[in-house]
Image: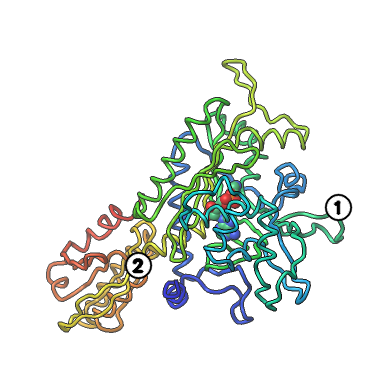
């Protein structure tokens, strides 16, 4: 993880927000290569989701009417249990305190509290999963942890207050007066912008269920625990799609979207063994089924995307709170109904981190001088790679540099490519490997004779010669679409 974070900073993928002031916890800035990678992740998602007949796009505002968040349940329920240390006043999320307990202790707690459920053998992984699931819902378990764990700050035992619920939404005010009538929230998810626009989009696009609405946008959560780089941040981007279906059809569509979403990761080069399904055993009261796609990060398995069967809860609640009908009238069958929703919800920044982590590799590779050295390589799928190619004159003379510049300028009309003429060619290849550029095109003395260049493949390091005027189609075939 440290290697990835340090590479991300050194090569301009991700910087700490407001770094010169000491940084702001849970916020990150995307540098020149980071913004390219992030845009490529978002574009890959957007194209997959919207280049079809049955999904429309949307870009709703971040600030919404405060009643939206009452209807959605976020005002009442979007909370984490927190405790304060009475001795030193430090504040903790209860699930963070849980991490202070050893696995053995957690096992004992589960057996003590739920003797029948956890009577048999318990695998360590199962213990951790159960704890994470139960911690936000089970008050007894929260209390046990408070008495077992000493305050991580002052070390005192049993000094925690009762757990209190802490709302994760950022509050702000519209207009000049800061009173309760002017409170608005920074949206904690993009989904509600889709629900409240359901009928607008349906009518404007003349869609009929089953159809979906897709959106990419910023979301904000006042997370108490913001560790693990981009995994859990306070400001992040979501890519969400709500698929509206006729009640009764939701199970079929749920399976369809589970398969489609897993395929998206695999098509972008993720290895199947790095991904797995996590089924939610304890469902939110409105949910019919929920699965997460988890990725194996360096710190362990973590959710990257949720696929949820949300029934007609959201539309019904907005109907109730707004007083406006959210029903669909089918003029062919003369049926009127509130559609059920299948949601696919993925973090752009969290999946950015998953793709960056999955791409990172180190291997021993031959140097030009007959020796070996460690090479760092980001094995991004060409569609995601920030730079699609590098144009390198072998030497900076004999017209090679001029010819290479002409090629680079022509390609830059279509792709992000990088021109580099400084240093030994081997070094320049390594610099491109380190940022994940899939192809290096080198202009050498033969180019001047027959207008061909060498193409070096990042992963195999093999080289072949192609005509210089074929570079564009070579790249289009591999990185576009
Ligand atoms: N509309 C449903 C929803 O928001 P969620 O499971 O809370 O569901 C969906 O979030 C996805 O958003 C997660 O799978 C994750 O990729 C991303 N996400 C959630 N909280 C995040 C955070 N604090 N930082 C980065 N990404 C986050």
Give me the disc on residue 163: none
- Mark 2 — residue? 378
* Residue 6 falls in image quadrant: bottom left
Label 1 SS: helix
In percent of width and height, residue 362 lies at: 31, 72
Label 2 SS: strand
- Mark 1 — residue? 181
Tell me if I can see residue 238 in this picture: no
Mark closest to the chain's N terminus, 2 or 1: 1
Task: Name the residue located 24 percent from the left edge and 79 percent from the top edge.
Answer: 426
- What crowding class fits label 1: few (fewer than 14 Cα within 10 Å), some (14-19), or many (20 or more)? few
In percent of width and height, residue 206 lies at: 57, 29
* Residue 269 falls in image quadrant: bottom left
Furthest-top residue in this view: 333
Asked if residue 397 lies left or right of residue 225, the reply is: left
Badge count = 2
Q: Is residue 188 above or below residue 316?
A: below
Query: 340 or 404: nearer the eye?
Result: 340
Task: Name the residue located 56 percent from the left edge and 40 percent from the top edge.
Answer: 242
């Amino acid at each position: 993880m440290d290697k990835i974070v340090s590479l991300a900073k050194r090569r301009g993928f991700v910087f700490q927000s407001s770094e010169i002031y000491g940084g702001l916890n849970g916020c990150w800035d995307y540098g020149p290569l980071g913004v390219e990678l992030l845009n490529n992740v978002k574009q890959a998602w957007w194209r997959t989701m919207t280049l079809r007949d049955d999904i429309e796009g949307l870009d709703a505002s971040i600030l919404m009417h405060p009643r939206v968040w009452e209807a959605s349940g976020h005002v009442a329920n979007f909370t984490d249990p927190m405790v304060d240390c009475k001795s030193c006043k430090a504040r903790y999320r209860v699930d963070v305190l849980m991490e202070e307990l050893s696995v053995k202790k957690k096992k004992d707690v589960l057996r003590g509290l739920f003797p029948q459920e956890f009577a048999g053998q318990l695998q360590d992984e199962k213990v951790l999963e159960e704890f994470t699931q139960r911690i936000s819902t089970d008050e007894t378990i929260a209390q046990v942890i408070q008495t077992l764990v000493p305050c991580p700050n002052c070390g005192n035992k049993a000094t925690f207050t009762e757990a209190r619920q802490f709302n994760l939404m950022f509050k702000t005010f519209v207009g000049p007066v800061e009173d309760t009538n002017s409170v608005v929230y920074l949206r904690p998810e993009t989904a509600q912008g889709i629900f409240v626009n359901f009928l607008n989009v349906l009518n404007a696009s003349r869609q009929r269920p089953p159809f979906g609405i897709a959106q990419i946008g910023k979301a904000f959560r006042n997370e108490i625990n913001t560790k693990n780089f981009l995994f859990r941040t306070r400001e992040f981007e979501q890519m969400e799609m709500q698929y509206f279906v006729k009640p009764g059809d939701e199970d079929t569509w749920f399976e369809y979207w589970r398969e489609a979403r897993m395929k998206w990761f695999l098509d972008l080069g993720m290895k199947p063994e790095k991904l797995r399904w996590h089924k939610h055993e304890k469902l939110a009261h409105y949910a019919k089924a929920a699965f997460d796609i988890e990725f194996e990060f360096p710190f362990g398995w973590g959710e990257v995307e949720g696929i949820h069967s949300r029934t007609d809860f959201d539309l019904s609640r907005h109907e109730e709170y707004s007083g406006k009908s959210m029903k669909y009238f089918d003029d062919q069958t003369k049926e009127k109904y509130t559609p059920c929703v299948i949601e696919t919800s993925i973090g752009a920044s969290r999946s950015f981190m998953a793709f960056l982590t999955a791409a990172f590799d180190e291997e021993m590779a031959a140097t030009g001088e007959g020796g070996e050295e460690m090479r760092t390589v980001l094995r991004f799928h060409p569609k995601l790679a920030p730079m699609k190619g590098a144009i390198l004159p072998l030497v900076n003379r004999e017209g090679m540099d001029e010819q290479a510049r002409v090629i680079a300028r022509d390609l830059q009309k279509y792709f992000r490519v990088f021109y580099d003429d400084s240093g030994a060619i081997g070094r320049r290849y390594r610099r491109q490997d380190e940022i994940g550029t899939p192809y290096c095109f080198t202009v050498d003395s033969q180019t001047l004779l027959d207008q061909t260049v060498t193409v070096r493949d990042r992963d195999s390091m093999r080289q072949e010669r192609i005509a210089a005027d074929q570079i564009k189609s070579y790249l289009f075939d591999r990185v576009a679409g």
